[in-house]
């Protein structure tokens, strides 16, 4: 297949060379030019905003070969009536058009659906048009839903009403979940969308998602206050203790987590006092304290480096010794402290080990270091148990009872796994892991599906890292690939046996009926 593409490319190049000889010049800019782009629109498509004043804004971009020329926006109600609009001459490769709310009486618009008709042209007359719809809501804050409920075993799977307390943030206070399962839902009687967190990772999944969802059964008990963000799908469950606080939550965001994420979440332990049990810091790290894991809400930095933060201050610069630290932050005084706990783990390698793995409990199967604290491997597993461990030694190991995903802890339980081929990922910084089912197929002109469809292989019963298939093949070519996609594929010029490599050559195949084997760990294959 690759050799065919190569020959076609050579023919196309030759034809272009002949054509070039008959022309004085080729307009390269014209050949590489594209219509102008609409980078963003506010209000965004399918978004919901609160009744009141707001501006309409669109940002445009184009290449240097054809700079921006003109843009227009029309605002229409749900009946198609034009409520306002504007046209503006543009210039350069990026520009914007803003219609102030006063120009179309935004604050007088009632609840309902509205449409924006956006158009932009460039200097060569190329144009792009887009039609978007947004909703103006009577809710006190922006939200994606008009109402929200919580349901679970604690209330007979009924519908306790939640209150919208901030943009996209719903809350209910003083609930006892009794350690049982529960969910959020957007209508009283399960008529539409609901959300659950079967993985207990702090983020909900929708029943309308590709994999559906499960109940949230994370063992919460006693009176708690619960919040749910219907934009990010993050939720919190905190004891309903009467502790003073000036922020709804607190996260440490820094260079060690790309200034985003909820893995370093503080707990409110006393009035205005937040504690992060541990975080590994290296000299040169920078960080901030943030109310939300994505910098929404308040955030705090330290402009002076004096241990007292300022709201929206600059990054805190860490110049201490490398180690694992406990972090304390007071949201009233804004004072913070770093307490050294221990030296950081020295992780040179991470592998999987256990009765389900190729090496059993005797030998680690090494994972690939992705260079960002995460490790991955494609491997077949038997029914059994596994753990993650570092440096081929038990001094540092992680486990948990959760499968197929969870968060491993030091000296945690063995992870129960089931037979199959898996793409395994593990984060040595957070302990988070996932086992995603995978498949290997045979594809090519020699196979029943040609180059259009894979013929799936199956894991060997005794060694599931070896994929097997009995199939009738014709004269032609074949390759192995992962999950019906070309992102990961193996090939070589050797037949009937060899070792496939990523993006290797097509395997030449002679007609016949074969038992085909392929080892995902080594790339070794055979046609017997």
Image (cartoon, rainbow, N blue to C red):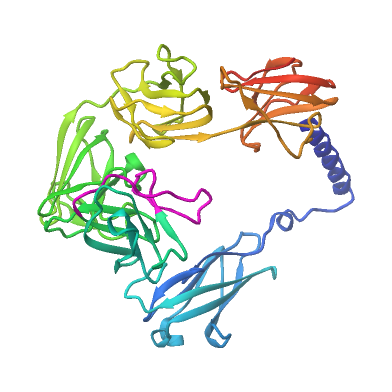
Provide residue 430's location: percent of width, then percent of height. 33, 36
Please indicate whether residue 326 sits to the left or right of residue 231 in the image.
left
Question: On the image, which quarter does residue 263 sit in?
Answer: top left
Question: On the image, which quarter does residue 51 sit in?
Answer: bottom left
Residue 64 in magenta stretch:
no
Q: Nearer the viewer, residue 404 or 245?
A: 404
Span highlighted in magenta in the image: 196-223
Residue at x-position 39% and y-position 56%: 232
Above or below residue 426? Residue 151 is: below
Question: On the image, which quarter does residue 388 sit in?
Answer: top left
Provide residue 441's location: percent of width, then percent of height. 67, 31
Please indicate whether residue 235 sits to the left or right of residue 42 in the image.
left
**Can residue 55 be spotted in the picture?**
no
Q: In which quarter of the image is the N terminus?
A: top right
Q: Nearer the viewer, residue 57 or 30?
A: 57
Above or below residue 229? Residue 96 is: below
Residue at x-position 46% and y-position 31%: 370
SS majority, magenta: loop
Name the residue furthest front: 156
Provide residue 349's location: percent of width, then percent of height. 40, 21
Name the residue furthest top: 362
Please indicate whether residue 364 sits to the left or right of residue 340 in the image.
right
């Amino acid at each position: 297949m690759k050799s065919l593409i190569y020959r076609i490319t050579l023919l196309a190049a030759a034809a272009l060379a002949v054509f070039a000889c008959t022309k004085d010049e080729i307009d390269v800019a014209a050949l590489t030019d594209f219509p102008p782009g609409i980078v963003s629109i506010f209000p965004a498509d399918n978004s919901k905003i609160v009744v009141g004043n707001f501006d309409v804004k669109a940002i445009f971009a184009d290449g240097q070969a054809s700079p921006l020329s003109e843009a227009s926006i029309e605002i229409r109600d749900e009946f198609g009536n034009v409520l306002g609009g504007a046209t503006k001459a543009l210039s350069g490769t990026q520009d914007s058009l803003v219609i102030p709310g006063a120009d179309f009486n935004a604050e007088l618009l009632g609840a309902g659906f509205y449409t924006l008709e956006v158009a932009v042209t460039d200097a060569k007359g190329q144009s792009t048009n887009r039609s978007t719809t947004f909703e103006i809501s009577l809710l006190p804050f922006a939200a994606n839903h008009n109402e929200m409920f919580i349901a679970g075993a604690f209330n007979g799977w009924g519908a306790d009403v939640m209150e919208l307390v901030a943009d996209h943030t719903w809350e209910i206070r003083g609930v006892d979940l009794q350690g049982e399962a529960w969910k959020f839902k957007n209508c009283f009687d399960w008529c539409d969308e609901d959300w659950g967190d079967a993985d207990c990772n702090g983020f909900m999944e929708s029943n309308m998602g590709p994999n559906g969802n499960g109940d949230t059964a994370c063992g919460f008990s006693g009176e708690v206050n619960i919040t749910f963000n219907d934009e990010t799908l993050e939720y919190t469950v905190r004891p309903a203790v009467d502790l003073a606080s000036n922020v709804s939550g607190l996260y440490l965001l820094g260079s060690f987590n790309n200034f985003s994420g909820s893995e370093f979440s503080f707990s409110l332990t006393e009035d205005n006092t937040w504690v992060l049990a541990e975080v590994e810091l290296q000299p040169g790290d920078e960080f901030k304290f943030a109310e939300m894991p994505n910098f929404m809400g308040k955030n705090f930095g330290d402009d002076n480096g004096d241990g007292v933060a300022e709201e929206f201050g600059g990054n805190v610069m860490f110049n201490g010794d490398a180690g694992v630290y406990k972090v304390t932050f007071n949201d009233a005084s804004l004072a913070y402290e770093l307490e050294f706990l221990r030296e950081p783990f020295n992780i040179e390698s991470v592998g999987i080990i256990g009765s389900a793995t190729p090496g059993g409990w005797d030998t680690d199967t090494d994972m690939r270091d992705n260079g960002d604290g995460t490790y991955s491997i494609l491997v077949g597993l038997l029914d059994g148990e596994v753990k993650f461990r570092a440096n081929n030694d038990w001094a540092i190991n992680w486990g948990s009872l959760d499968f197929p995903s969870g968060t491993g802890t030091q000296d945690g339980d063995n992870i129960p796994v089931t037979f199959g081929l898996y793409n395994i990922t593990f984060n040595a910084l957070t302990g988070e892991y996932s086992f995603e089912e995978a498949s290997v197929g045979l594809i090519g002109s020699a196979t029943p599906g040609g180059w259009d469809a894979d013929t799936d292989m199956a894991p060997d019963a005794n060694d599931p890292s070896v994929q097997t298939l009995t199939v009738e093949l014709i004269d032609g070519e074949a390759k192995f690939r992962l999950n019906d996609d070309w992102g990961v594929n193996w090939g070589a010029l050797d037949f009937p046996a060899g070792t496939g490599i990523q993006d290797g050559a097509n395997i030449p195949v002679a007609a016949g009926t074969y038992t085909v084997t392929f080892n995902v760990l080594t790339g070794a294959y055979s046609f017997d």
